[in-house]
Image (tube, rainbow, N blue to C red):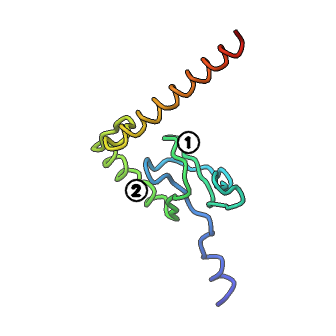
Amino acid sequence: MSINDCTKIKPMQGFQICPFCGGKIEYAGISSGHIFPAVHTGQMYVCRECGYQGSFIIEVDDPDDVREIREALHGYSEDIEKSMFSFPEKWRWFWKVILFLWVAGLIINIIGLLIMIF
């Protein structure tokens, strides 16, 4: 392999795009776990356009491929209906019970404090 052949090699860094909207991704650092702070869960990226945060991104070398992927993602995103978050139906009763117990405990503590004061 000659020196001229080495100059034809593409650079290592290509285009990094969002897997949801095809927008430009910024490196946000390495995140650590919330339950185990010493455990690193991977590199985090943030999309400038849609606000996606995560470690999964699409890396492409060719600008033509970037355009094709963006067109495909925009075509899919028009068909997707975005809904508000809601708890699954089978868990609603559980959270209602937890909320009731928490409020009842709070009221009992307030009554206990009032009895001690007066």
Q: Residues within 10 Å of mark 1 (few under 14, many from 20)?
A: few
Q: Amino acid at mark 1?
A: Arg
What x and y, as percent, mark residue 11? Answer: 63, 69
Question: How far, Cα to Cα, is label 2 from label 1?
Answer: 17 Å
Where disc 2 sits, the SS reads helix
Q: Is residue 96 above or below residue 112?
A: below
Residue at position x 36%, y 50% from top?
Answer: 71
Where disc 1 sits, the SS reads loop
Q: Residues within 10 Å of mark 2 (few under 14, many from 20)?
A: some
Residue mark closest to the camera, 2 vs 1 = 1
What x and y, as percent, mark residue 44? Answer: 61, 54
- The residue tagged 1 is 48
On the rendered structure, is 86 left or right of 41?
Answer: left
Q: Amino acid at mark 2?
A: Ile
Compare residues 81 and 94 and report the one nearer the observer: 94
Chain-order first, disc 2 or disc 1 = 1
Q: Which mark is residue 39?
A: none
Where residue 7 sits, quadrant-wise, is bottom right
- The residue tagged 2 is 69
Compare residues 106 and 21 and report the one nearer the observer: 106
Compare residues 8 and 69 and report the one nearer the observer: 69
What x and y, as percent, mark residue 42? Answer: 62, 61
